[in-house]
Image (cartoon, rainbow, N blue to C red):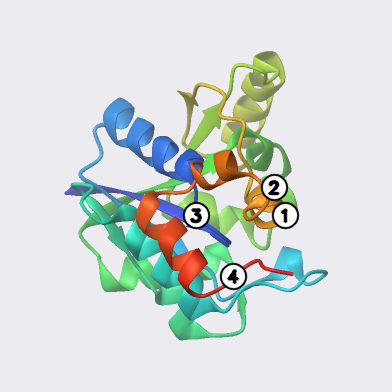
Amino acid sequence: MSKTGIMGGTFDPIHIGHIRLAEQAMAECKLDSVLFVPNHTPWMKHDRAVTKAEQRAAMTELAIEGHPGFGLSTVEIDAGGDSYTWQTLETLKEQYPDEEFFFILGADSLLSIEKWAHPEKIFENAAILAAVRDDCDKTKLEEQKELLASKYNARIRLLSMPFVDVSSTKIRQEFYSDPEIQKLVPPKTAAYILQNHLYSV
């Protein structure tokens, strides 16, 4: 059975932090592949405008080009509407019944995952790989890991992840004003942003 990591997100835009996390998960957990899954409409981000799904998918595809084992899935974009992790995992299970799935997320998301829709179905269909940065409260995360394991029979592994000072929000806000910000995005993705005038005022 192949081991497949799932990296979900808005990817508006995808940046080096996402790539490094996927690489770390592959290396540390010996994953065979990582699927990047841009969402269609992030239900937690209805308060702001989001770049068109097709453009976010294109940026993601350019960013992962040439990375062995990395792939793009448009399962959430194809489904349309609000994107929910539990639905995505169930769909992927149907599409790839022989795959073992590992959902990759940040440590902050692990602390709030019970607020997501149907967390029990998420834990049922995938193990969780949570990135622990150097500035995280590791004791709190270990306590959360034990709580979720006890409550949901969740399979959770904490990944060691060096701190990367990068956020999609900062990239959108400062992409044109700070050349250093552009370096936080894979080169082909940065070129796509410039060519399509994304994030310009």
Disc with the residue nearer the chain's start (4 vs 2):
2
Q: CA distance from mark 1 to mark 4?
A: 11 Å
Amino acid type assigned to the residue bearing label 1 in the image: Gln
Farthest right residue in view: 47
Secondary structure of the residue carrying tag 4 is: loop
Q: CA distance from mark 2 to mark 3?
A: 12 Å
- In percent of width and height, residue 64 lies at 31, 54
Residue 14: numbered disc: 3
- Residues marked 1 and 2 touching at CB (< 8 Å): yes
Q: CA distance from mark 4 to mark 2?
A: 14 Å
- In percent of width and height, residue 87 lies at 52, 70
Give the residue drawn at x 43%, y 67%.
Answer: 192
23 vs 138: above or below: below
Residue 198: numbered disc: 4
Give the residue drawn at x 28%, y 29%.
Answer: 27
Disc with the residue nearer the chain's start (2 vs 3):
3
Give the residue drawn at x 40%, y 53%.
Answer: 6
- In percent of width and height, residue 138 lies at 64, 16
Residue 170: numbered disc: 2
